[in-house]
């Protein structure tokens, strides 16, 4: 299934949920739509499924215009965030639902449906649950049944909305690996929505970062992590420390900051904003620096520092505890930035441009 | 040696359990239980042979038959119309929806005698509806249809108001799931929506039926009250009372009470059966 989405927009009442989405997905790909809540990722997924309709734009799948097709005719497997299992049906009947509602001409015989359901029960390792009702299942089991019900119709495309959102951490990791296995075994094109970066990067071939109704960046884990395309992506990827710097001949400078680890970059001279992760910041004793240690706490493995500056908001640094010179509250420190993203300060921080693979971004490492 | 400590008593989080339960029980006994027991005792003092003679008299049997048939007609109508109404009120947005929703309670609020009078006025030979129906050979007033009409009018909120909240709470992603799995709209209704509201719908229908059996005020005006033809059981009991035949009244009332109890039990069994998949939920 190759999917092409272009210039898609959608409004709910007075809110723009999608502000022009262009996206291509290759057959057999496993793609994650990653973004904070309200970024439009679930709406986009529902439009692909036919459960929502865009105001403008096109959705073409294998050359066919899917906006002319009702959800029931798209043969898409959709796994809902809260599973939406039919509560009055057993697991077996839930799995058989998609086959048993087909028009008589296309419907497999009773024996064929039973065989298909048995096959799925074994494939999903839930054969012992066949005669239970959804209310009698745990979250992880419901998730498997929900996926099984979607797979029963042999979908051309598998869509999952926050598939692990309601599960606890250990089960999430298990199911993640298991879903990857299912994807590889069935070979179907798969798109899932998540707000969890770890989940998106571990599971997906390609991650689409969405923010405020636009695609902010498309790429692999390392690419998005090291080279965020916009301040939005940088922040979303955990660069919570924002510091003003001055650029001169491609070098960033600021009092109290050691920025020599950052490579030279092709940005015009002038004011800029630096985005860094707390883990990429080292605090080193330096009596001349305006930065002070406001608070030190230890998790055993790491030291977490809150750093204050007379004119700037507080910054945070996380350093390994061993091998770090002891720091006390009130010490003057210089901040050595190991890696950071830089964006010209004049740039509006409003929604990132839809063009995402564009190498205009200027990042350091 | 360990000295015996005072036993630990679990304390309830909410205070006033004893007081509130006591008040409720007292009220229940005074207002509901004692009158019912009195009725049963009154019936018991008649003696089985005489009791049977009263309730199996031709006039009483005819009254029971008319009441049951009319209530059945009214309930079938309400089961369909009430479901449709609940559906419209929960699923669509349209101007005046809140007004319509409020109107649904009018049969509860309106004195039943007022309902009976206005229905009679509308459906009598020279009323708005009667003027059309009568020449067409469908007399409503003074027939069993009139009785059923009055019953339906007063009991329809029971179906609407029991189905409506369940339909509102129904997870719409269930329907979306059914649609992505390829179900047509009627399949979604029959296989997903209807099973979910079935317990509430059955409960609403049985309560509506029970209410119809006991309806009095709305019916006496429209029924004509001809013995053997349009005389309902509740009216017959009333007539016996007016004749100072307390035993006759009590016997008929007891049979109505019996119907009501059987219905309540049946309603509960049906609901348990329809909701059997929820048992595991606790």
Image (cartoon, coloured by chain):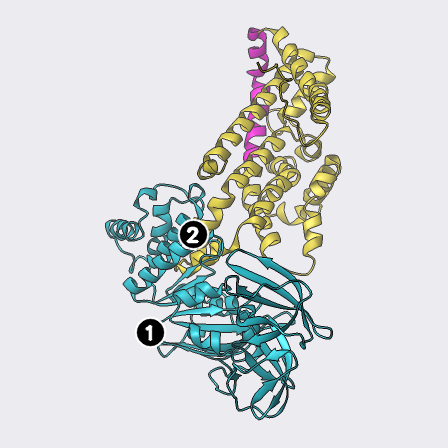
Chain colours: A cyan, B yellow
* Near-viewer residue (B112 or A137): A137
Which residue shows up at 68% across the image and 36% down it? B222
Left or right of B261: which side holds B16? right
Left or right of A296: which side holds B199? left
Q: Which residues are magenta?
A: B48-72
Which residue shows up at 55% across the image and 34% down it? B206
Q: Quadrant of the N terminus of chain B?
A: top right
Q: Is residue B128 visible?
A: no
Rendered location of residue B10, percent (x, y): 63, 25
Confirm whether circles 2 and 1 share one chain.
Answer: yes
Rendered location of residue A21, percent (x, y): 50, 78
Callout 2: SS? helix
Q: Which residue is mark 2?
A: A170
Confirm whether the magenta stretch covers residue A269.
no
Rendered location of residue A158, percent (x, y): 38, 64
| Position above or below: A199 against B89 | below
| Position above or below: B250 against A138 | above
* Near-viewer residue (A365 or A131): A365
Quarter of the figure with residue A148: bottom left
Quarter of the figure with residue A303: bottom right
For the residues carrying marks 2 and 1, which lies nearer the camera in this image? 2
| Position above or below: A17 against B239 | below
Left or right of A134: which side holds B203? right
Quarter of the figure with residue A277: bottom right
Query: Which is the main secondary structure of the residues drawn in magenta?
Result: helix
Q: Which residue is mark 1?
A: A27
Protein chain holding label 1 = A
Which residue shows up at 66% across the image and 33% down it? B223
* Near-viewer residue (A55 or B265): A55
Whole-number angstrom distance, CA of label 2 to CA of label 1? 31 Å
């Amino acid at each position: 299934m190759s999917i092409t989405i272009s210039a898609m927009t959608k409004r709910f009442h007075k809110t723009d949920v999608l502000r022009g989405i262009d996206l291509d997905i290759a057959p057999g790909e496993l793609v994650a739509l990653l973004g904070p809540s309200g970024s439009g990722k679930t709406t986009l997924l529902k439009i692909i499924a036919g459960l929502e309709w865009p105001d403008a734009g096109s959705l073409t799948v294998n050359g066919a215009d899917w906006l002319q097709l009702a959800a029931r005719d798209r043969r898409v497997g959709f796994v809902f965030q809260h599973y939406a299992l039919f509560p009055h049906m057993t697991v077996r009947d839930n799995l058989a639902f998609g086959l048993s509602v087909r028009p008589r001409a296309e419907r497999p015989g009773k024996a064929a449906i039973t065989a298909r359901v048995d096959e799925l029960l074994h494939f999903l390792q839930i054969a012992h649950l066949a005669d239970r009702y959804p209310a009698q299942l745990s979250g992880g089991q419901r998730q498997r049944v929900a996926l099984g019900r979607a797979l029963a119709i042999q979908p051309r495309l598998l869509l999952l909305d926050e598939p692990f959102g309601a599960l606890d951490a250990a089960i999430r990791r298990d199911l993640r690996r298991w879903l990857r296995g299912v994807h590889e075994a069935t070979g179907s094109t798969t798109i899932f929505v998540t707000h969890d970066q770890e989940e998106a990067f571990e599971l997906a071939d390609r991650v689409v970062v969405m923010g405020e109704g636009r695609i902010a960046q498309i790429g692999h884990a390392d690419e998005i992590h090291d080279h965020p395309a916009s301040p939005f992506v940088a922040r979303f990827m955990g660069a919570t420390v924002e510091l003003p710097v001055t650029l001169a001949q491609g070098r960033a400078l600021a009092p109290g900051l050691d920025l020599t680890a950052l490579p030279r970059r092709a940005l015009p001279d002038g004011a800029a904003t630096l985005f860094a992760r707390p883990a990429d910041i080292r605090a080193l004793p330096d009596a001349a620096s305006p930065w002070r240690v406001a608070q030190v706490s230890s998790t055993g493995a790491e030291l977490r520092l809150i750093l204050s500056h007379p004119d700037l908001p507080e910054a945070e640094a996380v350093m390994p505890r061993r091998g770090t010179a002891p720091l006390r509250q009130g010490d003057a420190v210089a901040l050595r930035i190991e890696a950071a993203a830089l964006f010209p300060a004049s740039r509006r921080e409003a929604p990132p441009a839809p063009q995402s693979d564009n190498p205009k971004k200027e990042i350091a490492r | 040696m360990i000295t015996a400590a005072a036993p630990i008593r679990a304390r309830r989080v909410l205070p006033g359990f004893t007081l509130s339960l006591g008040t409720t029980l007292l009220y229940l006994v005074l207002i509901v239980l004692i009158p019912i027991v009195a009725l049963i005792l009154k019936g018991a003092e008649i003696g089985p042979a005489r009791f049977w003679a009263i309730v199996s008299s031709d006039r009483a049997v005819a009254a029971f038959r008319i009441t049951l048939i009319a209530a059945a007609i009214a309930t079938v109508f309400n089961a369909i119309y009430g479901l449709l109404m609940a559906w419209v009120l929960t699923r669509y947005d349209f101007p005046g929806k809140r007004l319509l929703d409020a109107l649904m309670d009018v049969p509860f609020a309106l004195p039943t005698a007022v309902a009976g009078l206005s229905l009679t006025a509308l459906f009598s030979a020279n009323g708005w509806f009667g003027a059309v129906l009568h020449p067409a050979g469908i007399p409503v007033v003074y027939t069993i249809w009139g009785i059923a009409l009055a019953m339906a009018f007063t009991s329809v909120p029971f179906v609407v108001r029991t189905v409506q909240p369940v339909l509102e709470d129904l997870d719409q992603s269930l329907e979306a799931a059914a649609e992505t799995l390829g179900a047509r709209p009627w399949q979604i209704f029959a296989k997903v929506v209807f099973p979910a509201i079935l317990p509430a719908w059955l409960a609403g229908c049985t309560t509506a039926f029970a209410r119809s059996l006991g309806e009095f005020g709305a019916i006496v005006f429209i029924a004509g009250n001809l013995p053997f033809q349009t005389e309902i059981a509740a009216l017959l009991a009333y007539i016996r009372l007016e004749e100072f035949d307390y035993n006759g009244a009590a016997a008929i009332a007891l049979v109505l009470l019996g119907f009501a109890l059987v219905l309540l039990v049946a309603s509960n069994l049906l609901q348990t059966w329809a909701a059997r998949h929820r048992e595991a939920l606790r």
